[in-house]
Amino acid sequence: MSDQGLLMLGLGLLAAAVLLVVAEVFIPSGGLLAISAGVATLAGVIVLFQVDKTWGLVGVLTVLVMGPLAFGFAIKVWPNTPIGRQMLLGNISEEELANQRQAEKAERDRRQALVGAEGEVIATLRPVGVVRIAGERYEALAETSMIEAGARVRVTAVHDNEIKVRAI
């Protein structure tokens, strides 16, 4: 086989390995696709070394870069796949999942509605502590510096579960 043919074979094996890793995320194969990806990766690098040492090193560097990227992609996407949800959440129905998402959205909206509300510091904010707003306790983060217990505060921002406050 010519060098051009070996080069295309080596690069094709590396591309197939990446596709197999991505497929492993969506297709429950018990690890067979991952093992196949490992074999394809090893074979691709060996073939590239047969073409030239430079191409072999390019293949190794590609694996060192694309491997963690593919793994990161898999970790990020996997919980949103049907098999990932089933493994993480158990046998939860679509209706229960929709109810859970709706409850989470309602909680986010409730916290977002706190922006502009005033409250009192219960546990000193250094910069994290506890505040009471509208009769409820929340963990909060001081925007500027330490705020002593008993001080009045105003909610300035809510990001995810983090409530930011500033002394009044």
Image: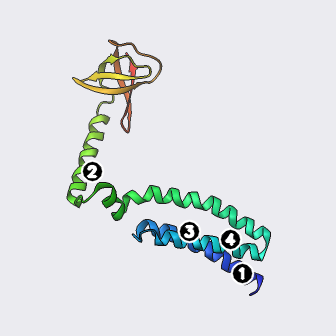
Amino acid marked by disc 2: Arg
Question: Could you tell me which secondary element the residue under label 4 belongs to?
Answer: helix
Q: Residues within 10 Å of mark 2 (few under 14, many from 20)?
A: few
In this rendering, which labeled residue sits more in front, label 2 or label 1?
1
> SS of the residue at dot 3?
helix
Residue at disc 1, secondary structure: helix
Q: Amino acid type of disc 4?
A: Val
Which residue is at the front of the view, 88 or 156?
Answer: 88
Q: Residue at x 52, y 70 (%)?
A: 35
Q: Which residue is mark 1?
A: 6
Q: Is residue 19 above or below residue 127?
A: below
Question: Of tags 3 and 4, which is closer to the observer?
Answer: 4
Q: Name the residue tied to disc 2.
A: 101
- Reading the image, the residue beneath label 4 is 45
Extreme residue in the right direction: 53
* Residue positioned 30% across, 30% down in the render: 114
Which of the two labelled residues, at mark 3 and mark 4, occupies the earlier sequence position?
A: 3
